[in-house]
Image: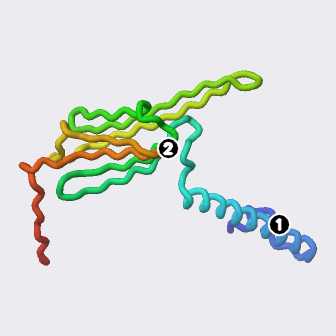
C-alpha cells in the first residue's frame, strides 16, 4: 500500500526507469547508512569535553572504603583558586570558573570556562571534615565516614 504513495517505488514496465529508481534507492540508503554511522560514532565516543556554552563536562569518579568516600573530578586548565568546594545541608557543591582576557593582534581574545556539579552526601558522611586537594588538573575531595553510624551488611536469603 505504501508503495503507491512513494513515486519512485511505483512499478513501471520501462526497465530504464526501474534502474533509475533502484539507483536512487541505493543512493538514499547509502546516505542514511553514512549518517547513522556518523551519529553512532559521535555518541559512542562521548560528548566533547567542552560544550559550546562554556560549561565543561568532566569525568567524575566515586570510590568508597571503610574510612570514607573519595570523589575524583578532572578539571584541566583550572587553577586551585578557580575552584570552589562548599557543603550545605548535606549537599556538596563543586564549582570551577575561569575567565581569561588577552590582547591579540587585531583586538582581544576572551576565554571562558566553568564547571558546576552538586552531590547528595550519604547520612554517615562527616560533612564538617571534608578535605579537597587539586594537583595536575585533578580535584580529589575526601569525605570521611562517621564511625558512630557504621554500615551493616544485610544477608540476602533465597525465597
Give the quarter of the image for residue 6: bottom right
Mark 2 touches mark 1? (CB < 8 Å) = no
| Left or right, 93 with reference to 65 | right
Q: Return the x and y of residue 115 as percentages of the image width and height.
A: 45, 37
Tell me which numbered mark, 2 or 1, is placed earlier along the sequence.
1
Q: Is residue 154 above or below residue 87?
A: below
Locate residue 17 relative to residue 99 in the image: left or right: right
Q: Secondary structure at mark 2?
A: loop
Q: Which residue, as the protein is rendered here, is positioned at the far left?
A: 148
Residue marked by disc 1: 24
Q: Residue at x 33, y 36 (%)?
A: 93
27 or 75: nearer the viewer: 75
Residue depth check, mark 2 versus mark 1: number of the one nearer the observer: 2
Categorize mark 2 by other alpha carbons within 10 Å: few (<14), some (14-19), many (20+). few
Q: Position of residue 94 (x, y in %)?
A: 36, 37
| Residue identifier under label 2 | 76
Q: Nearer the viewer, residue 136 or 51?
A: 136
Numbered label tally: 2
Q: Height in image: 97 above or below 7?
A: above
Measured from the top left, where is residue 56 in percent x and y?
50, 41
Quarter of the picture holding the C terminus: bottom left
Residue 34 drawn above or below residue 129: below
Q: Is residue 68 left or right of residue 78?
A: left
Tell me the residue at 88%/74% (across/down): 19
Task: In this rendered view, identify the residue nearer to me: 124 or 99.
Answer: 99
Query: How far is disc 2 from disc 1 in space, using C-alphas?
Result: 49 Å
Q: Which mark is residue 88?
A: none
Q: Position of residue 148 (x, y in %)?
A: 6, 49
Amino acid at each position: 500500500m505504501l508503495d503507491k504513495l512513494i513515486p519512485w517505488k511505483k512499478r513501471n514496465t520501462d526497465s530504464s526507469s526501474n534502474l533509475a529508481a533502484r539507483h536512487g534507492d541505493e543512493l538514499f540508503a547509502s546516505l542514511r547508512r553514512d549518517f547513522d554511522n556518523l551519529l553512532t560514532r559521535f555518541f559512542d565516543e562521548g560528548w566533547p569535553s567542552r560544550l559550546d556554552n562554556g560549561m565543561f563536562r568532566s569525568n567524575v569518579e566515586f570510590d568508597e572504603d571503610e574510612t570514607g568516600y573519595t570523589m575524583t573530578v578532572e578539571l584541566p586548565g583550572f587553577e586551585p583558586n578557580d575552584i570552589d568546594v562548599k557543603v550545605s545541608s548535606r549537599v556538596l557543591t563543586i564549582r570551577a570558573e575561569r575567565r581569561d582576557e588577552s590582547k591579540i593582534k587585531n583586538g582581544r581574545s576572551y576565554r571562558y570556562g566553568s564547571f558546576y556539579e552538586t552531590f547528595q552526601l550519604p547520612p554517615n558522611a562527616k560533612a564538617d571534615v571534608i578535605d579537597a586537594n587539586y594537583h595536575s588538573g585533578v580535584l580529589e575531595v575526601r569525605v570521611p565516614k562517621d564511625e558512630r553510624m557504621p554500615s551493616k551488611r544485610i544477608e540476602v536469603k533465597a525465597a
